[in-house]
Amino acid sequence: MTKITLNPAFEAIRGKMDGIVYRVRYRKQTGSKAPDMSKVKWSAAQKEHRKRFRLAVEYAHAAMADEQVHAMYVKEAKKKDKRPFDLAVSDYFKGRNLLG
């Protein structure tokens, strides 16, 4: 495994660049070859779940854009030690729609 020493001004590098995926795991920077997903055949259930998740993310973006709903999610997120956006995604899957 390649080890990377970064300038102290950089805390970490994340993402994909030139076929390598960079991430921090167990407080160490890692880089590994990106998986080749070109030949994967997604099942109907996987496709449906991806569609539902895309809709949940769209709902969460709309909820964060509405000031009143966003404030409610921020308040709830502090109680549960979670992020407001994540709570909005979760609410979509639970059938709760605060946008009206």
Image: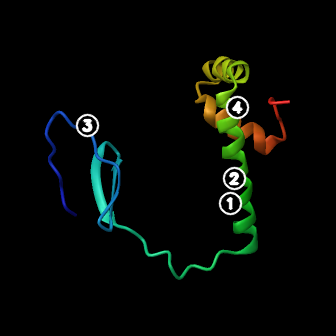
In this rendering, would 32 be left or right of 74? left
Determine whether, in the image, residue 97 is placed left or right of residue 49. Answer: right
Distance (Cα) linking label 1 and label 2: 5 Å
Residue wearing tag 4: 63
What percent of the width, then of the height, locates residue 44? 75, 73
Instruction: Give the amino acid at mark 1.
Output: Arg
Residue placed at 65% from the left, 29% from the top? 65
Q: Which residue is mark 2?
A: 53
Instruction: Return the residue at label 1.
Output: 50
Question: Tag 3: Cα neighbours inside 10 Å, few (<14), some, or many (≥20)?
Answer: few
Q: Quadrant of the C terminus?
A: top right
C-alpha gap between disc 1 and disc 3: 32 Å
Q: Residues within 10 Å of mark 2 (few under 14, many from 20)?
A: some
Q: Amino acid at mark 4?
A: Ala
Between 68 and 92, the one lying in front of the other is 68
Q: CA distance from mark 4 to mark 3?
A: 31 Å
- Callout in the foreground (4, 3): 4
CB of mark 1 within 8 Å of CB of mark 2? yes
Which circle's residue, 4 or 3, is located before the other in the chain?
3
Q: Considering the numbered disc 1 on the image, is that residue within a helix, a strand or a loop? A: helix
Q: Which residue is mark 3?
A: 11
Asked whether the residues under the numbered discs 2 and 3 touch, taking CB atoms below 8 Å apart as contact, a structural biologist would say no
What amino acid does circle 2 point to? Answer: Phe
Q: Amino acid at mark 3?
A: Glu
Q: The residue tagged with tag 3: helix, strand or loop? A: loop
